[in-house]
């Protein structure tokens, strides 16, 4: 078989395999729409290297809800051993993934692991890809992924996983259509017009080859006609069999087909010869996915329903049949009763595997297909769906379902369930930024549960929930009061997880006071031990999150980075997305403090681009993004971001949300000498400070920005020692050194701005390293107002001349993007490596806040960077 215009891709794959043989593994993504030849390229590569490696092939299925870890089940028999046992036993994913990695490392030859069609991957498979890719360099494995680039963006889980793979170990091959010359070459000795063929196909390899391989080689009116013409050349029985196989979302076991049509063995050989179907081990599949789609679409609705029903009946006789596959066929067979019966079980399986998005879809299917169900079972199904929505950041839907549960239970005698539902509503409303509703439902929960004759575990949960709300408002006395009440009841029920939750509230609030900080850390450590002992993942990550927030505000980056990476990995492994995005927001805050602004913006955007993101998560991500934008001179965008985050923070009515926003707004006012019309956020703390707020790091920064704005602060506020010397004793040396010792150069520069002429010059030097053009202008204006001479210019003209603060080299790369050059061509022209070009393009995307080359060029022209 001749591969046209694919030699360069094969050469790259061979290069990556050579590097693998030298001990360096990589992840390779082969992108291209259906029919561009991804599978054919893999087959050609396999034929070259098959004698020198172990070759594993798995695929993802186009099901309504993809089967969890489908590619691993495909290779389970080939791998065998403890890996197979763990997989079939339904063990935790991290154990399965680690077992696979260990097995790969023991192979006596390099391993090439191909996962096809990752755009259909479930969440668990997305995590598998991320897990392997992070460890790929010394894994003895070359991981090759194929994807339809036009569909991969629809799969949020896989898109997120790919975006987080280190560029150092990630290679991308983007397949393109054949050129006109290639098509002419392909038909040079055939009685077919290459020009007409190229005109109708635009060089799409599948369309070209399908037309060439059609028996009469006539150019049909459409590609679908070509495929269907080939189908109609089959005998009736062969056509029936082909249509049946097209109903399956991906490949199908030959054994299952033989059970459905025992006589099919007599027809398969001719179908395989026609090239429509191919053998794939013990499976059968269409040679091209487009062919399957066209054939399936050509079947009448009535017949399609009949075929789905036939398949479903056969699967029902198989005790080991995949539940997700059965639900897929039941849905298409218009069997709502079967969907209602099986979808909850399939949802339970998906949830246990950590595939929470799939679980939510399955529970939703069950809800939609259920006509009658006892209230108790109905509530349980709604509860499961609501929890999956909560875990997957679909908070509005989660709250909506909880409201439905409220209506079902309104006239019920089940006060226990009613009270517990109110507690969940409290939690969800808080996470969605509605603090007042959270308190209202918290009190309703307690009212319902206290009316019961017994002190139930649900009451203990309601008490600690209220304690948490008081903790978040920094109400020390009420936090301790309600959490102690919770612990007393929880111990009677031997519920260590509830005790851990209450202790987390108590430990967290003690962290906020200097005099109880060390005690708070001890309480949290004890709570963590209990959470681990009770295997409560939610409590485990909540405790770690509390410590992460504390260490970030303390700028204790050593302790922070001992826990933050493992906490993020924990969330990813268990798909606790609500905390995952919250932690990424705090990671953005850390990077903003440390001057890693491109990374901070990348992290913030990762959080903010998620549709229906929780308000709490948006707040923590918006603040660092707004501050970086304002410092770099992107005034209008910064103001829009601050306006949004101010509204979100006000709805929480929590100082820990409002103070960072107040600091950011005060910083904006100072840099641009422009006062916000609405001062509610800025004045919030001054109005509530009589209650006492003990997060001294936030209060200290707030006092600093008030001072820079010429506004007063109370000397009775709890400030850190270095801020007392800075703001009260007018001695900035200790505070500046504190920041410099922690690599917080921007904060040091701001503190220097309160000093003498020498301090102001040092401030500009520090700001210049950060490209903080707007802040430099502010410091220069301060120097001018004081009559100082020879004021430093600050940022280089070559960078400052463009509002996005691109470097000269980044502008060079951007110009070549505008000329339509690819990475290799840019590298050759600028005498740099392709990897360097890739890094420059990544930075350009971040600075211009775009996600494609075309958008980067358009944005650059809008900003006047390019003509």
Image (cartoon, rainbow, N blue to C red):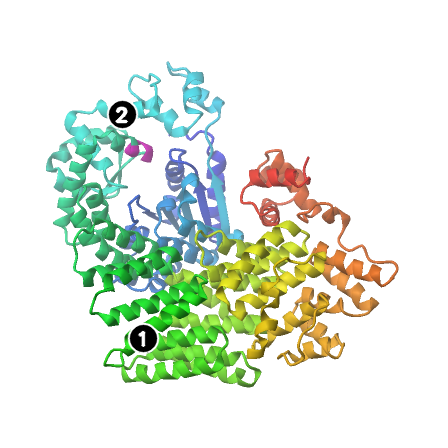
Evaluate whether residue 394 shows in this view: no
Name the mark on residue 792: none
Most common secondary structure along the magenta stretch: helix
* Residue 122 position within the rendered picture, expressed as x and y whole percent measured from the top left: 34, 51
Q: Closest to the observer: 554 or 25? A: 554
Instruction: Classify 10 Å Cα crowding around label 2: few (below 14), some (14-19), many (20 and above).
Output: some
- Tell me: residue 580, above or below residue 536: above
Q: Could you tell me which quadrant the C terminus lies in?
A: top right
> Number of numbered discs present?
2
Residue at left offset 41%, top offset 80%: 503
Which residue does the numbered mark 1 point to in the structure image? 447
Q: Which residues are magenta?
A: 289-293
Which image quarter holds the N terminus? top left
Q: CA distance from mark 1 to mark 2?
A: 67 Å
* Quarter location, residue 560: bottom right
User: Judging from the image, what secondary structure is the residue with disc 2 in?
Assistant: helix
Write down the quadrant of residue 856 in the picture: top right
- Percent from the top left, x then y, of residue 616? 48, 62
Q: Residues within 10 Å of mark 1 (few under 14, many from 20)?
A: some
- Residue at the disc numbered 2: 228
Left or right of residue 559, residue 110 in this image: left
Nearer-N-terminus badge (1/2): 2
- Seen from the viewer's position, the closer of residues 616 and 87 is 616
> In the rendered image of this protein, does residue 508 appear above or below residue 616?
below
Q: Quick check: 653 left or right of 708? A: left
Write the residue at 46% across / 24% down: 182
Q: In which quarter of the view is residue 642 placed?
A: bottom right
- Answer whether residue 122 is magenta in the image: no
- Can the viewer see residue 508 in this picture? yes
Residue 506: x and y in percent read 45, 80
Mark 1: which secondary structure? helix
């Amino acid at each position: 078989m001749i591969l046209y215009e694919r030699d360069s891709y094969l050469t790259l794959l061979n290069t990556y395999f050579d590097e693998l043989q030298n001990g360096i593994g990589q992840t390779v993504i082969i992108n291209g729409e259906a029919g561009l030849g991804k599978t054919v390229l893999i087959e050609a590569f396999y034929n070259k290297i098959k004698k020198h490696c172990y070759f594993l092939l798995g695929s993802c299925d186009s099901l309504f809800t993809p089967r969890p870890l489908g590619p691993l089940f495909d290779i389970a028999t080939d791998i065998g051993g403890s890996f197979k046992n763990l997989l079939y036993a339904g063990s935790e994913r991290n154990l399965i993934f680690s077992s696979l990695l260990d097995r790969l490392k023991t192979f006596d030859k390099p391993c090439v692991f191909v996962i096809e069609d990752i755009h259909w991957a479930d969440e668990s498979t997305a995590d598998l890809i991320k897990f392997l890719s992070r460890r790929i360099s010394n894994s003895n494995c070359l991981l090759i992924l194929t994807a339809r680039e036009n569909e991969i963006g629809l799969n949020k889980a896989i898109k997120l996983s790919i975006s987080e793979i280190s560029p150092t170990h990630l290679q991308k091959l983007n397949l393109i259509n054949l050129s006109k010359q290639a098509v002419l070459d392909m038909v040079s000795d055939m009685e077919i017009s290459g020009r007409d063929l190229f005109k109708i196909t635009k060089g799409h390899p599948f369309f070209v080859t399908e037309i060439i391989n059609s028996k009469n080689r006539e150019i049909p009116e459409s590609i679908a006609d070509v495929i269907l013409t080939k189908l109609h050349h089959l005998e009736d029985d062969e056509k029936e069999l082909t249509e049946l196989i097209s109903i399956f979302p991906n490949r199908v076991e030959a054994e299952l087909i033989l059970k459905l049509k025992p006589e099919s063995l007599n027809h398969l050989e001719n179908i395989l010869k026609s090239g429509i179907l191919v053998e794939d081990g013990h499976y059968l599949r269409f040679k091209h996915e487009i062919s399957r789609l066209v054939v399936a679409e050509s079947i009448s609705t009535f017949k399609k329903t009949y075929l789905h029903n036939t398949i479903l009946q056969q699967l029902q006789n198989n005790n080991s049949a995949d539940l997700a596959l059965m639900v897929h066929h039941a849905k298409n067979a218009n069997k709502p009763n079967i969907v209602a019966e099986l979808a909850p079980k399939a949802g339970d399986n998906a949830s246990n595997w950590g595939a929470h998005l799939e679980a939510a879809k399955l529970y939703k299917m069950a809800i939609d297909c259920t006509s009658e169900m006892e209230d108790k079972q109905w509530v349980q199904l709604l509860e499961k769906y609501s929890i999956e929505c909560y875990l997957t950041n679909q908070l509005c839907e989660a709250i909506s379902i909880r409201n439905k549960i409220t209506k079902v239970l309104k006239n019920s005698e089940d006060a226990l369930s009613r009270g517990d539902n109110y507690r969940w509503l409290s939690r969800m409303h808080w996470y969605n930024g509605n603090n007042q509703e959270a308190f209202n439902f918290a009190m309703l929960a307690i009212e319902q549960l206290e009316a019961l004759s017994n002190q139930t575990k649900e009451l203990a949960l309601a008490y600690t929930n209220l304690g948490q709300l008081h903790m978040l408002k920094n109400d020390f006395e009420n936090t301790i009061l309600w959490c102690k009440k919770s612990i007393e009841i929880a111990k009677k029920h031997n519920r260590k997880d509830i005790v851990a939750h209450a202790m987390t509230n108590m430990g967290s609030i003690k962290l906020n006071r200097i005099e109880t900080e060390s005690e708070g850390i001890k309480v949290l450590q004890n709570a963590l031990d209990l959470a681990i002992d009770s295997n409560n993942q939610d409590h485990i990550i909540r405790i770690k999150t509390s410590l992460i927030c504390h260490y970030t505000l303390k700028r204790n980056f050593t302790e922070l980075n001992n826990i933050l990476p493992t906490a993020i990995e924990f969330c990813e492994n268990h798909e606790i997305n609500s905390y995952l995005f919250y932690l990424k927001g705090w990671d953005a805050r850390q990077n903003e403090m440390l001057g890693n602004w491109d990374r901070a913006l990348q992290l913030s955007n990762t959080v903010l681009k998620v549709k229906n993101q929780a308000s709490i998560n948006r707040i923590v991500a918006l603040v660092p993004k707004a501050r970086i934008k304002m410092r770099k001179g992107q005034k209008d965008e910064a103001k829009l971001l601050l306006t949004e985050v101010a509204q979100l923070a006000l709805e929480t009515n929590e100082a820990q949300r409002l103070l960072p926003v107040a600091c950011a707004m005060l910083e904006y006012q100072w840099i641009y000498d422009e006062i916000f019309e609405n001062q509610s956020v800025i004045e919030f703390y001054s109005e509530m400070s009589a209650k006492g707020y003990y997060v001294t790091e936030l209060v200290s920064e707030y006092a600093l920005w008030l001072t820079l704005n010429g506004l007063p602060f109370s000397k009775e506020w709890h400030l850190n020692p270095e801020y007392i010397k800075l703001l009260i004793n007018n001695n900035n040396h200790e505070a500046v050194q504190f920041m410099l010792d922690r690599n917080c150069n921007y904060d040091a520069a701001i503190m220097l701005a309160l000093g003498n002429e020498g301090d102001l010059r040092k401030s500009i030097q520090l700001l210049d390293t950060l490209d903080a053009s707007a802040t430099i202008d502010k410091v220069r204006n301060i120097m001018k107002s004081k009559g100082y001479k020879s004021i430093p210019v600050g940022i280089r003209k070559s960078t400052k001349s463009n509002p996005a603060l691109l470097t000269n080299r980044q502008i060079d790369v951007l110009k070549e993007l505008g000329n339509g050059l690819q990475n290799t061509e840019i590298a050759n022209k600028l005498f740099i490596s392709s990897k360097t070009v890739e890094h420059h393009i990544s930075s350009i995307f971040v600075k211009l806040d775009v996600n494609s080359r075309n958008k980067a060029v358009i944005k650059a022209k809008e900003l006047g960077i390019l003509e």
